[in-house]
Amino acid sequence: MVAMPQSQLDRQLNRFSRSTSGWLSAAATARRGLNGGWRGRIAVAQVARALCGVLLAAGAAAGAGAEAGAGAAARASAGPAVQTAAAAPTGVEAGTLEVAGGKLYYEVAGHGPALVLVHDGLLHSVTWGEQFEAFARGYRVVRYDRRGYGRSPAATAPYSNVEDLLALFSALAIDRAAVVGCSAGGGLAIDFTLAHPERVRALVLVGAVVGGLPYSDHFLTRGGRLPATPQPQELKSAIEYWAVSDPYYVAADHRQIKERVKALFEANPQNFRHPDRFQQHPPGSPLAQLPAIHAPTLIVVGENDIPDVHAHAGAIQAGIAGAQRIVVRDAGHLVHLEQPQLFNSLVFDFLKAQR
């Protein structure tokens, strides 16, 4: 593993903070006023896109050394009320947790140290199917649907994803856990760790993004495949695009995985439809606060993921001292779905080293 000296990390993050502070404030203000679901999230990113080129280059450069080390190896190797829910899979405890102004569906399996799985911004907790069973052989594994996804109803009042996750920890009597988050779920894992560091034993970030680092035009348009200005999109077209056409969400040659993702989208259209106007975001810039994270951190990125995600991975690695970054060959954004055996092995080995 090639690590960047701490002084260099500090200088890199200070440059990020100084150059973006005004933009981050404007973006946060705009974001709180949006209500357009995933299209709204794309619109928010456009507030700061004028600085993207500089930030993305810096983020990618910050992680280049570690990618050359660990990445090469990966390429070579390939209190609240709780209600019991019906139709739980065999050996799995399922329930619905009452949270402020809403409910969260969750599942728990296995025994041992706690491990919590946090899904991305399009699929819900079912995305962790290949991990839930495997990790339950050595851990007490929890997966849940965030508000508006899967079996959790959409929010009808202001809420915080960070506080929802804390409520889940409390309800399930989890003192500390390893938290595994994908994409936006990785961003939530970072936010949660910053807010409640004593509750996080280790972090695994899969194609994660971090608040405070804006997106490029290439990301916003998915390489010119979507309009620069978000347009209303028919549900069927949105599902077809994200499941089949987008070359980054799932790598282009993974046809069976694409069909599986499409079937999950079609069975759960609410994942696209729920508004996020009630979602409250943590104060400040998570990007600038990354040095405050001391939990052992593993960053996993698919080599075919969109360049912005690689830049975010580099920025996260630059900010968290000792973080490891691995680039997985023949995978897009959903590494855990596309390369489950390799992903599970990487996570098992990483967590075993932390015990």
Image: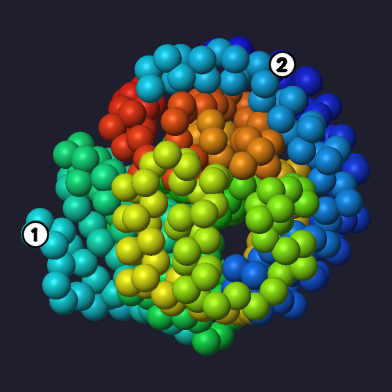
Q: Can you tell which mark lies on residue 5?
A: 2
Q: Residue 221: horizontal and vertical position, in percent?
A: 70, 56
Q: Secondary structure at mark 1?
A: loop
Q: Secondary structure at mark 2?
A: loop
In the picture, measured across the screen, residue 271 lies left or right of residue 138, that is right
Which residue is found at the position 42% from the left and 61% from the top? 123
Q: Quadrant of the N terminus?
A: top right
In the rendered view, tell whether residue 42 sits above or below residue 298.
below
User: Dot 1 surroundings within 10 Å: few (below 14), some, or many (20 or more)?
Assistant: few
In the rendered view, tell whether residue 308 sits above or below residue 272.
above
Which residue is found at the position 68% from the left and 42% from the top? 308
Q: For residue 79, which quarter of the picture?
A: bottom left
The answer to which of 307 and 231 lies nearer the viewer is: 231
Which residue is found at the position 20% from the left and 75% from the top? 85
In the rendered view, tell whether residue 78 sits above or below residue 98.
above
Q: In the rendered image, is residue 280 in sight?
A: no
Q: Residue furthest left?
A: 90
Q: Residue 279: horizontal and vertical position, in percent?
A: 60, 73
Give the distance between the C-alpha atoms of the residues marked 2 and 1, in whole angstroms: 49 Å
Which residue is found at the position 61% from the left and 42% from the top? 306
Amino acid type, mark 2: Pro
Colour option used? rainbow
Q: What residue is pinned by disc 1? A: 90
In the picture, measured across the screen, residue 314 lies left or right of residue 168, that is right
